[in-house]
Image (spheres, rainbow, N blue to C red):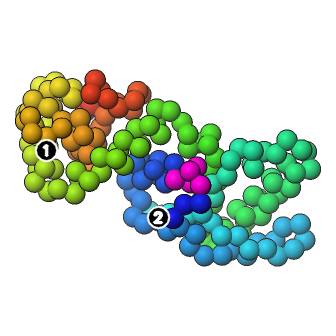
Amino acid sequence: MQCESLLELDALMMLDAFDRAITNVESQPFKVEYRHDGKFRNWTPDFLVERAGVRPELVEVKTLERLYPAEPLARADAIHRFRALQDATERKGFKFRLLSEAEIRVQPALYNAKLLCRHSPLRNNPALVLRGRMALLKLNQHTIDAFQEAIGPDVDGFAMAVAMDWLGHAQLDRRSRFSRASTFRPL
């Protein structure tokens, strides 16, 4: 997936890690014509996000500085511009979502999202996933140490627990950074 900034990449990680309803994401999918300041302009959304059973969403990622400029005239212009983008988006049948670092770079969620992405290759191994599910069924305590013991020494229990979270078989405690001390609940 192509991203123009680290903030966009972080936004994708957050969406991918925690929104299980997403079926497809496209980077800079197409241009949307909108009217602002008496002129027609073109806008290319950062992402098109599709979810099962709901209207697709066009997402724009901006820094807080771009959303809320210090200079009053620039701030007013930004507000009108984003309203115009929202109106044009909704006329085309899409939802509009504006994300800034205030929604994206929230801790410990972003840290956890990065871990979920880092350990995602494990979820593509059907034999390991089955083994992880079987280990979850054996547990009396829902700790990484207990999961490690149940899954065996040849697999990293923490990495596998993260993969099981990604797949929806367990949910690590999201109130703190994921770690080998994390607890979870089977789903």
Q: Which mark is residue 133?
A: 1
Q: Which mark is residue 97?
A: none
Image quarter in which the C terminus is found? top left
Marks 1 and 2: in contact by CB < 8 Å? no
At 92% across and 50% down in the image, what residue appears? 73
Where 91 sits versus 155, above or below?
A: below
Quarter of the image where one finds residue 124 = bottom left
Quarter of the image where one finds residue 147 = top left
Question: Horizontal placement of 162 versus 139: left or right?
Answer: right
Q: Kindly report which numbered mark, 2 or 1, lies closer to the viewer in this rendering.
A: 2
Question: Horizontal placement of 183 versus 177: left or right?
Answer: left
Mark 2: few, some, or many residues within 10 Å (few <14, many ≥20)?
few
Q: Closest to the observer: 105 or 183?
A: 105
Q: Closest to the observer: 12 or 172?
A: 12
What kind of residue is marked 1?
Arg
At 10% across and 54% down in the image, what residue appears? 127
Residue bearing the label numbered 2: 1
At 26% across and 45% down in the image, what residue appears? 163
What kind of residue is marked 2?
Met
Q: CA distance from mark 2 to mark 1?
A: 30 Å
Question: Horizontal placement of 184 versus 65: left or right?
Answer: left
Q: Position of residue 80 (x, y in %)?
A: 82, 57
Task: Identify the magenta region.
Answer: 5-9
- Secondary structure of the residue carrying numbered label 2: loop
- Secondary structure of the residue carrying numbered label 1: helix
Work out whether residue 139 can be spotted: no
User: Is 6 contained in the magenta span?
Assistant: yes
Q: Position of residue 183 (x, y in %)?
A: 27, 27
At 14% across and 56% down in the image, what residue appears? 126
User: Is 135 contained in the magenta span?
Assistant: no
Where 32 sits versus 105, above or below?
A: below
Q: Position of residue 59 (x, y in %)?
A: 59, 60
